[in-house]
Image: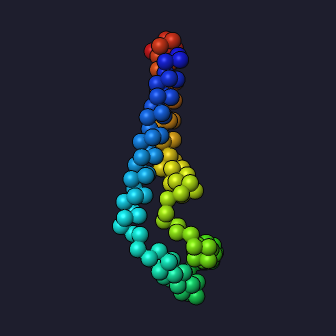
Amino acid sequence: KKKRFYVILLILIILIPVFTYAQLMTAQNSREKFDQDWRREITQQITDYQNSLGSDRIPEEWKKYRRIMLQQLQYYLDHDVNPSEPNGVTFTRIFMDNSATLFIPLLIMAIASDIVSSERSTGTIK
């Protein structure tokens, strides 16, 4: 029974560095491609959001989201923060996004197969 736990733990120990390395390479590639004038891009996004807030065709929920995004983008400009630069917060956010789609289903599948395997080995499943 402990062997299965160690196998799952080994899979986790292998997958976490792989995810981390892939995320690092993605951040480096995007920095090389898109590291022009990030202030100009954010200013353009702010202008687009402000223009869309004046439209009557956009639902109120989206307008609320866009107001929040406007505040966030304005904060980036005011405090000279490049949002596409990799740091601890963006790393954690992207890692959690990836883990929700890749890591958690894999873990559930491993635990489910462990349960079925233990039922089979004890003879309660025929």
Taking the view exactly as shown, the residue that stands out farthest to the top is 123
Question: Splitting the image into 4 quarters, where does residue 102 fall?
Answer: top left
Q: Is 89 above or below relative to 109?
A: below
Q: Residue at x 48, y 50 (%)?
A: 98
Q: How many marks?
A: 0
Q: Position of residue 12 (x, y in %)?
A: 48, 34
Q: Position of residue 1 (x, y in %)?
A: 53, 16
Q: Position of residue 19 (x, y in %)?
A: 44, 45
Q: Is residue 115 visible?
A: yes
Q: Is residue 69 visible?
A: no
Colour mapping used in the image:
rainbow
Q: Residue at x 47, y 16 (%)?
A: 120
Q: Residue at x 56, y 54 (%)?
A: 88
Q: Nearer the viewer, residue 8 or 73?
A: 73
Q: Residue at x 43, y 58 (%)?
A: 27
Q: Position of residue 42 (x, y in %)?
A: 51, 77
Quadrant showing the C terminus: top left
Q: Is 97 above or below relative to 104?
A: below
Q: Nearer the viewer, residue 54 or 87?
A: 87
